[in-house]
Amino acid sequence: MNMIFSSRDRLLAALNCETPDHSPCSFMIFGALHQGSASYLDFIKRQLDLGLDAFVELPVRPPQVRNDHYNLHGLPVSYHPEVWVEESVTQYTDEPDPLLRKIYHTPAGDLTAEVRQTADWRWGDHVPFLDDYLIPRSKKFLVEGPQDLAAF
């Protein structure tokens, strides 16, 4: 039977290991399309016009909210009670951009992230826990191998 699924039914079928009419295609982060939209409703409609299964945030995240779990859309992130975080900014003479360093001091050891603070860095002197901006600007990733997993 060839049935056309709604976007919701398609996503639910996939999550339930059932067979949808086709694989769902949903983008959590679609900045350019969102910026070019007149409103959040227009953004959703544009996704649907492209044939995508729209990712809809309810309630819509306020744009001024910036924290370590900004891209997790309301999912809580918390650290072990004994974890404390240290952030610093250093400008080296042989580097064009300042280097941001964030150290998570955990009971199982320290985890350190180092990121180049390029001109388009949107976080000020802060290094978020998760963000797409980290990948191309990172000098040292928070987790680099199995030796970091216990602290992570």
Image (cartoon, rainbow, N blue to C red):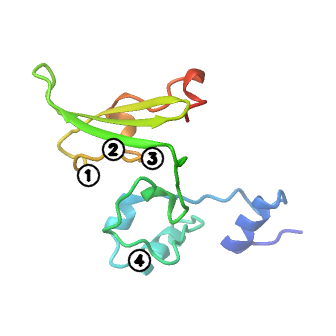
Disc 3 element: loop
Q: Which residue is mark 1?
A: 122
Q: Which residue is mark 4?
A: 40
Residue 28 point in image, percent of width and height: 51, 59
Disc 1 element: loop
Spatial separation of the CA atoms under disc 3 and disc 1? 13 Å
Q: Is residue 131 shown above or below 73? A: above
Q: Earlier in the sequence, mark 2 or mark 4?
A: 4
Q: Is residue 131 left or right of residue 146?
A: left
Nearer to us of marks 3 and 4 is 3
Foreground of the two, 55 or 61: 61
Bin the neighbour count of mark 2 within 10 Å (Cα to Cα): few under 14, some 14-19, many 20 and up. many
Spatial separation of the CA atoms under disc 3 and disc 4? 23 Å
Bin the neighbour count of mark 4 within 10 Å (Cα to Cα): few under 14, some 14-19, many 20 and up. some
- Which residue corresponds to the image point at 38% horizontal and 47% vertical from the top-left? 128
**Residue 121 appears in view:** yes
**Type of amino acid under label 3:** Leu
**Type of amino acid under label 4:** Tyr
Residue 38 point in image, percent of width and height: 32, 78
Q: Is residue 152 shown above or below 45? A: above
Spatial separation of the CA atoms under disc 1 and disc 2? 10 Å
Kindly check if marks 3 and 1 are in contact, taking CB atoms under 8 A apart as contact: no
Q: Which residue is mark 2?
A: 127
Kindly check if marks 2 and 3 are in contact, taking CB atoms under 8 A apart as contact: no
Kindly check if marks 1 and 4 are in contact, taking CB atoms under 8 A apart as contact: no
Q: Which residue is mark 3?
A: 130
- Which residue corresponds to the image point at 21% horizontal and 39% vertical from the top-left? 118
Spatial separation of the CA atoms under disc 1 and disc 4? 21 Å
Q: Is residue 17 shown above or below 103? A: below
Nearer to us of marks 1 and 2 is 2
Q: Is residue 39 left or right of residue 147?
A: left
Nearer to us of marks 2 and 4 is 2
